[in-house]
Amino acid sequence: MISVIIPHLDQPEMLRKCLASLTREINPRLSVEIIVVDNGSNPLPTEVCAAFPNVRLLSEPVPGPGPARNLGVLHAVGDILAFIDADCIAAEGWLLEIEHQFSRNTQKSILGGDVRIQCENPSRPTLLESYESVFAYRMKEYIAKQGFTGTGNLAVRAEVFASIGGFGGIDIAEDRDWGQRALQRGYRTYYCPGMVVYHPARKTLGELAQKWDRHTAHDFARLKARRGWWVLWILRAAAIAVSPIAEVTRIGSSDRLRGWRARVLAFAGVVMVRSYRSGIMLALAFGASAPNLSQRWNRKASMALPRGTSKARS
């Protein structure tokens, strides 16, 4: 059986589309259960989940997608665990590909798939759609260079997950942490190009900034434990600021963009994003609060900050 686990927070319509994409391919060949773990929505997506077969709704009050996924695992009965995010749409055959990969090769324990941007109008992508088509969710590269894949398109044998342990909390990048712990225990993540999910691009630069606030705070916390961290961090901030120049070739040769308009927009996007990242890195170096940045994933977390600490907007 495949247990599909979906963390959810205040995205009922996206969750509905996600569940529709999963349930359309359930057939007698597959034994599937779907577990949605809500992470603080008001109201709970009860009606959305009830509209689809084989869907259970759980609630995890501890903020963060990692704790939500862990609760789903505790209640799962499948020998394969498949993770997808509530704002993703599974391509046709996603579940069948997971089942096929694991049944064909018993040596494979962890799979990471391809995540593509779903453009509202593919013939005229927005700046953020163009940028994220090239620079977001580069799972093949993450697996090859860093040994992890994103938890929005991940499948693992249940006994292997138990051996590795659960995902971390909101204070770390839980996908990278989990994947690298798996690698340290001798489990390789295999890239599976036929295991495809679609993710909408972010609507605003503010949403993208929120993502980089969190990831940069995680990177800062890791590097700060090293001797000479401040100089290394400043040098990294400077390198990121000038790095868009090196991305011209990647943008020009990308098979995920069509036409020069989309490529120009992608380059404008990478300049804006890298400039922002460099700026918040410098802010952290000169005293900004990393915990405040990392807690922005879940508004409940920022509402629960101690008195006297500024609240982060979700």
Image: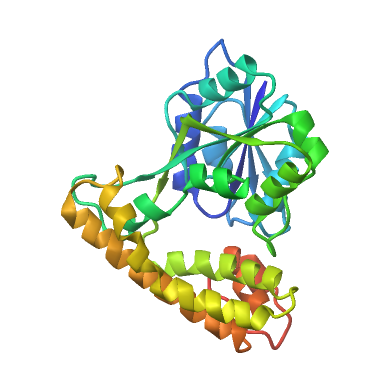
Q: Residue at x 51, y 67 (%)?
A: 212
Quadrant in which the N terminus is drawn: top right
Horizontally, residue 41 falls left or right of residue 79, namely: left
Q: How many labels were placed on the picture?
A: 0
Which residue: 70% across, 65% down?
171
Instruction: Give how far across and how far down residue 25 sits, in percent.
Output: 48, 21
Q: Measuring from the top left, give residue 14's x and y in whole percent.
A: 45, 45
Outermost residue, right direction?
A: 163
In the figure, 269 relative to 18: above or below? below
Location of residue 9 (image quadrant): bottom right
The quarter holding residue 301 reads bottom right
Look at the image and tell me whether residue 130 can be seen.
no
Q: 14 or 174, which is in the foreground?
A: 174
* Of residues 216 and 295, the one drawn nearer to the viewer in this rendering: 216
Q: Residue at x 64, y 73 (%)?
A: 220
State whether residue 239 appears in this view: yes
Residue drawn at (40%, 68%) of the image: 243
Q: Quadrant of residue 298?
A: bottom right
Q: Position of residue 91 (x, y in %)?
A: 42, 31
Q: Is 240 displayed left or right of 157 in the figure? A: left
Residue 16 place in picture, x, y as percent: 47, 39
Between 137 and 231, which is closer to the camera in this rendering?
231
